[in-house]
Image (cartoon, rainbow, N blue to C red):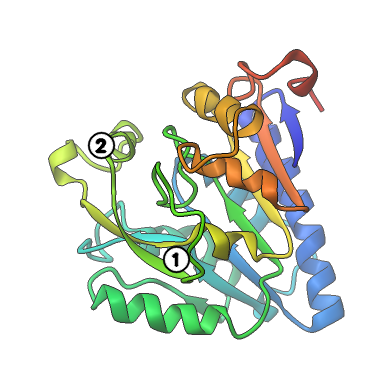
Amino acid sequence: MNISVYENKTLLGRAAAEHAAITMRTAIRDRGKARIIAATGASQFEFLEALTAAPEIDWHRVELFHLDEYIGLPLSHPASFRNYLLDRLIRPTGIPTGHLLDGNADPEEVARSVGEELNRAPVDIAFVGIGENGHLAFNDPPADFETETPYLIVELDEACRRQQVGEGWFASISEVPRQAITMSIRQILKAREIVAAVPDARKAKAVKACCEGEITPLAPASALRLHPNTTVFLDAQSAALLSPGMRALA
């Protein structure tokens, strides 16, 4: 795992986007398309804003896969991750092929069908975040590190659901769905490259646990250290609890 720390979330987002853009351009040049996995949530705002503005990416040769989605939440809801990706990535760039997880359809069928599309070819790069409880996608602790199933139906724990309220997506925890469709840990790790954008002080404990603690299902994002080509982009606040040598500014 490579760790890069920046003074603030704006610089973090720009650096992560520049890094991701290089990988995407290379994939398009060498293989004719870039297959990507996109994360959502407040932590990805600056990254996606910079990525969609990056020059010389042929977005019409990009195929997008959805990392996770609530079950039972309509597309029209402000917290819908499908809505998020349409507004912040698909429409701004014109990506022609986006395999979105329909949380209002049969979740088992959605997980199966999108999983089949996902496994048709390798993914070039996965964009992820780290949750306040250490989750990776919606794999809350203790996460399943063993299953090869591409997408899982999961129960969201209280810490995860409270994070969604804290970020302003829902007015109260009672409004947050209790279930979601999520890409599995092993499926995420199958991507050729992983970029994690993780700003804000509220992520500092999870960052320390996942970057310096034991690799364990109790800290799901610690699995990123099992991948040979992962870069974690932090700001000074999210890196605050790391050992001094690891939190030096880039």
Q: Residue at x 77, y 50 (%)?
A: 18
Label drawn at residue 12: none
Please tell me whether residue 15 is drawn above or below residue 148 in the rendered image: above
**Residue bearing the label numbered 1:** 86
**Residue at image coords 68%, 44%:** 225
Label 1 crowd (10 A; few <14 / some 14-19 / many >=20): some
**Element at label 1:** helix
The residue located at (76%, 23%) in the rendering is 246
Q: What element does badge 2 sit on?
A: helix
Instruction: Classify 236 as above or below 146.
Output: above
| Residue kind at label 2, given as amino acid type | Glu
| Mark sitting earlier along the chain (1/2) | 1
User: Depth check: 176 or 112 in front?
Assistant: 112
- Report x, y in % for residue 19: 78, 51
Residue corresponding to mark 2: 158
Q: Closer to us: mark 1 or mark 2?
A: 2
127 sits left or right of 40 in the view: right
Mark 1 and mark 2 in contact? Answer it, CB < 8 Å.
no
Identify the residue at image location x=44%, y=46%. Answer: 41
